[in-house]
Image: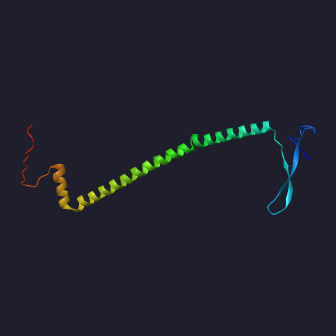
Amino acid sequence: MVLLPTRPSRFNDSTIQRFNDSTVQRFNGSTEKILVFPYSPTQKKILLICSILLALLLAGWILFAPSHSTLTYYHARKNLAAIQNDNARLERENKALAEEINRIENDPAYLEEVGRKQFGLLKKDEVVYDFGKDK
């Protein structure tokens, strides 16, 4: 049996914890002695409860931490997807507007069509007849 102190040297030599000797056989066939600390059932329960509480605390921190939690990451990913969709939509709109500007600058027939439809412009000596509803 091997005797080891449980606390730093500030305690007297009568404070000694007993360890049991155990022999372990390795895969390569060698054997060696290791020290095994015999926990009492009460110590095992306390250790189990503390381990479970620590695991729950860690899981809670991972899920609900204020700035680096899993939920924050999930919401940021969702936000990123929405922003990327908006960005793609705006790029399509910009491309369509650039094409329209190019047509207006380079196609006189399209320029005339836009002028007639949007601004009601007329050529010289044209008359507009409006057969709309009476007011």
| 11 relative to 88, above or below | above
Which residue appears at 9% of the width and 41% of the height?
133
> Where is residue 134 shown, x and y percent of the image?
8, 39
Q: Is residue 25 above or below residue 39?
A: below
Instruction: Using the image, determine if residue 15 lies above or below residue 102.
Output: above
Left or right of 88, for residue 51: right
User: Residue at position x 66%, y 42% from top?
Assistant: 55
Q: Residue furthest right?
A: 13
Q: Where in the figure is residue 56, as x and y percent of width and height? A: 64, 40
Q: Is residue 92 left or right of residue 41?
A: left
Image quarter for residue 37?
Answer: top right
Q: How is the image coloured?
A: rainbow
Q: For the C terminus, give its image quadrant.
A: top left
Between 11 and 46, which is closer to the camera in this rendering?
A: 46
The percent coordinates of residue 81 (x first, y second) are 45, 50
Left or right: residue 58 versus residue 76 is right
Residue at x 61%, y 40% (from the top left corner): 60
Task: Give the side of residue 114 with respect to residue 86, left or right.
Answer: left
The tally of labels here is 0
| Residue lying at 19% horizontally and 57% vertically, measured from the top left | 111
Q: Where is residue 52 shown, x and y percent of the image?
A: 68, 40
